[in-house]
Image: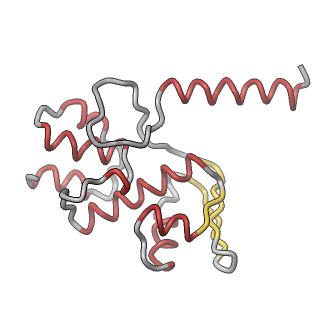
């Protein structure tokens, strides 16, 4: 991995990588960018080496992916999915993600409750085949399906149509 890519992946203010992934021609660099655009730590190949800052970034992105699936996450689940060894690090990462979502931490119950979402992971629109990511990221189609389900729920449960 070259220094320019490492700097982009270590940049604490940058959490979206789809544009770089789409523009990249080199397969090895594209694989790394795919992981950071759509993947989680579970998608990281064993032979891919990350710096500690890149590892932390991927942990954060993995937490964001979890928050898109469920609004209540146990600390145990987050620790397992994101390879976080201690609770203080877990809570620190959740607080650092406040620009992605509101979160309430319950240290006694060891639960993080996700409130309002402010941002999300990249949406995959089949622009090019995925090489590393096994768990299907949010796609345009799945996003549209979720919006239609939400619309139907509003019409039946709230509006009463």
Residue 121 lies, with reference to residue 52, above or below; the image says above
Q: How is the image coloured?
A: secondary structure
Q: Is residue 44 left or right of residue 123?
A: left
Q: Position of residue 36 (x, y in %)?
A: 31, 48
**Which of these two is toward me, 61 or 48?**
48
- The residue at 32%/50% (across/down) is 14
Quadrant housing the C terminus? top right
Residue 27 lies, with reference to residue 126, above or below; the image says below
Q: Quadrant of residue 113?
A: bottom right
Question: How many marks on residues?
Answer: 0
Q: Position of residue 100 (x, y in %)?
A: 51, 51
View extreme (left): residue: 2
Q: Is residue 117 left or right of residue 126?
A: right
- The residue at 51%/78% (across/down) is 87
Q: Position of residue 51 (x, y in %)?
A: 21, 65
Q: Is residue 131 left or right of residue 61?
A: left
**Which of these two is toward me, 129 or 72?**
129
Residue 156 lies, with reference to residue 82, above or below; the image says above
View extreme (top): residue: 161
Q: Is residue 88 left or right of residue 48?
A: right
- The residue at 55%/65% (across/down) is 77
Q: Position of residue 27 (x, y in %)?
A: 14, 37
């Amino acid at each position: 991995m070259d220094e320019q890519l490492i700097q982009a992946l270590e940049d604490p203010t940058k959490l979206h990588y789809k544009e770089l992934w789409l523009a990249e021609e080199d397969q090895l660099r594209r694989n790394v960018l795919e992981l950071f655009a759509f993947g989680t730590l579970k998608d990281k190949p064993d032979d891919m080496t990350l710096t500690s800052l890149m590892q932390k970034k991927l942990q954060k992105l993995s937490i964001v992916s979890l928050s898109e699936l469920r609004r209540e996450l146990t600390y145990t689940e987050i620790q397992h999915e994101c390879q976080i060894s201690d609770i203080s690090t877990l809570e620190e990462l959740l607080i650092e993600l406040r620009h992605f979502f509101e979160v309430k931490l319950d240290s006694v119950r060891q639960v993080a409750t996700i409130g309002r979402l402010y941002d999300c992971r990249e949406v995959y629109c089949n622009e090019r085949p995925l090489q590393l990511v096994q768990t299907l990221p949010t796609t345009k189609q799945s996003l549209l399906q979720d919006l239609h389900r939400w619309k139907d729920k509003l019409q039946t449960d709230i509006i009463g149509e």
